[in-house]
Image: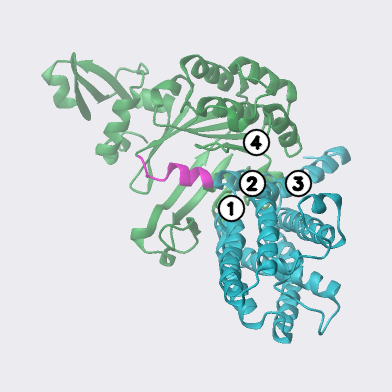
Amino acid sequence: MIEVKDLSIGYSIPGNTPQIFTHSDDYDSSEIVLRGLSLKIESGKVYGLIGRNGVGKTTLLNCISGLIWKNSEKKVFIDGMPFSNGNPNLSSRIFYVTDTTPPIHVRVDKYARKLSMFYPLFSMDCFNECVELFGLNYKEYIDNLSLGQKKMAFLSFAFASNASHIILDEPTNGLDITSMRTLRKLIASNMTDDKTIIISTHHINEISSLLDHIIILNNKNAVFDHSVLEAGRVLSFVESDKETDKEKALYSMSSAYGNRMILPNTSGIDSEIDYELLYEAVLDDSNRINSLFK
Amino acid sequence: MKHNNTFRLNRFLGLIGTGIYKRKNSKTLTFTIWVGILFLFVLLNQLISNLEFDSARIVVTRVYQISYIVFLSVPVFRLTFNEQMSIQWNLLPASAFEKNLYSVLGMLIWRSLLFFIVVLGLDYLLWSGSPFIESMGMEMGQCRIRLTEFFTFGITDTIMPRWVSYVLVFFFYTSIPILAGISNNTSLHREYAFTYAWSAYIIFSTFINYCFKGGKEYEYLVIVFGCAGIIGLIYNIIFSITRSCNTKA
């Protein structure tokens, strides 16, 4: 489990690397990216992290993965222990696939061998399987690969590392349709009760079938943090042209067939989530949506 | 999670290998350019030595000095390795102590190779003569300025043996980046500090070299900065251990 407690991150010097603030009076509100954020990320679930550009998704992931390490031990807890990048036992439980991938002049297979030295549970068989599924060439140099292929290589390292917590920042960027399907297949087949996968994405519909939980960031905090199951049970996503439905709607958006709406779910049957609608509704008025969740 | 000895050994080798790679990778191109320009300087040196008129010699020497500054500035702009490489290095599951130690070791090993083997090796070749040097049309000992003087800023052996000065200059050469590395509190930003420090170092050393070239004053400065470099290295290692302990606490 990953736990984030009262996390505030910002820039003490504009343009500099963000840092974790330990006291609320340490920062000016204009410099803050995330303020007092608390999250509980449970094992055995796939989390979707969404939000506008620049809202702090990558900053949060950088913090959880240990890239922003100063004071992280006071705010981030991995499997109940204070987390710091300096603790290899904990950091080897995390694998972070960053949004941009490095142009390393090393062959894919050699990089995997080097990486395996740092991850005690690394499985070369799993790596080979992932690489084959993505249709990558082992002998290719990483810096010669295209953006999508680099992503595939690092996703293969991530699943082969057998790390308990896999963090993927925009994993679908650059992937073709077939690779996207492969990624979904790999996530589904690699999920176990002791693993957590956090996916930050702007293309939520591409991975929506895998998600167990949704976190929406806005206004420097998590404005929506509920399981998919709970969201489907509490909210009803409908498309209708009836004016009476529109009046009852918590949020509506015009569509080709009338309106896409969110209504309180009173039917007792779980509704299928319209992620785009949910996202827009939460950004519009998160309090109204959250008031239905107990 | 229990680790067996093979895993520990592999991990150690992986860390030290990555530490060197991290340093080496940023400098491969620079190094190639460096060696190429080094030979250009040897040829320029020949030109200065063979000039007959003092005024012409002064002009060419000035051009030579300016080019020399530019030449030394090349590694400054190539030193900062790719930010993505830095992210990958920071994400490696290793302690702060291990990362700092192997980063410093990687830097020292790579700079030792550059400084002691390449520079001193070329210097030896140029001064002792070899078929390669002769094929370039140069005679043994003809170079007016020794290659080591590019790096030792015209150091002489007036107050200390030359080999001592080489060791001190090596630490002088590494002191500021090491000190800059430990003074920065964010790992991502630390690598930029190396570049800033190098820029300051080049400007500063060129200035003092210009003022005190070959004199005792300059050698005193080398002693001071060389010792600062040694202290900086020791401090960096102690700091790494302390920070590592703090992290665990």
Q: Secondary structure at mark 3?
A: helix
Query: Residue at position x 57%, y 27% from top?
Result: A145
| Amino acid type of the residue that numbered disc 4 sits on in the rendered structure | His
Q: Is residue B125 above or below residue B144?
A: above
Say which mark, if any, is on residue B15: 3
Type of secondary structure dominating the magenta stretch:
helix
Task: Looking at the image, tell me whether mark 1 or mark 3 is earlier in sequence order.
Answer: 3
- Examine the image and state in which quarter residue B42 appears: bottom right
Q: Nearer the viewer's eye, disc 3 or disc 4? A: 4
Q: Look at the image and tell me in which quarter the N terminus of chain A lies.
A: top right
Cβ atoms under marks 4 and 1 closer than 8 Å = no
Q: Residue at x 40, y 52 (%)?
A: A33
Q: Is residue A185 above or below residue A157?
A: above
User: Of discs 4 and 2, which sits in the foreground?
Assistant: 2
On whether disc 3 and disc 2 are found on a single subunit, the reply is yes
Q: Amino acid at mark 1?
A: Arg
Q: Which chain is green?
A: A
Residue that numbered label 1 is attached to: B78
Residue B223 in view here: yes
Dot placed on the residue nearer the N-terminal end, 3 or 2: 3
Front one among B40 and B238:
B40
Alpha-carbon span between mark 2 and mark 1: 8 Å
Badge nearest the viewer, 3 or 2: 2
Question: In the rendered structure, which disc, 2 or 1, sits on the residue that comes first in sequence?
Answer: 2
Report the label total. 4
Mark 3 and 4 residues: CB-CB less than 8 Å, in contact?
no
Chain shown cyan: that is: B
Residue annotated with mark 2: B29
Type of amino acid under label 2: Leu
Query: Is A57 in the magenta?
Result: yes
The chain letter for the residue carrying disc 4 is A
Residue A105 marker: 4
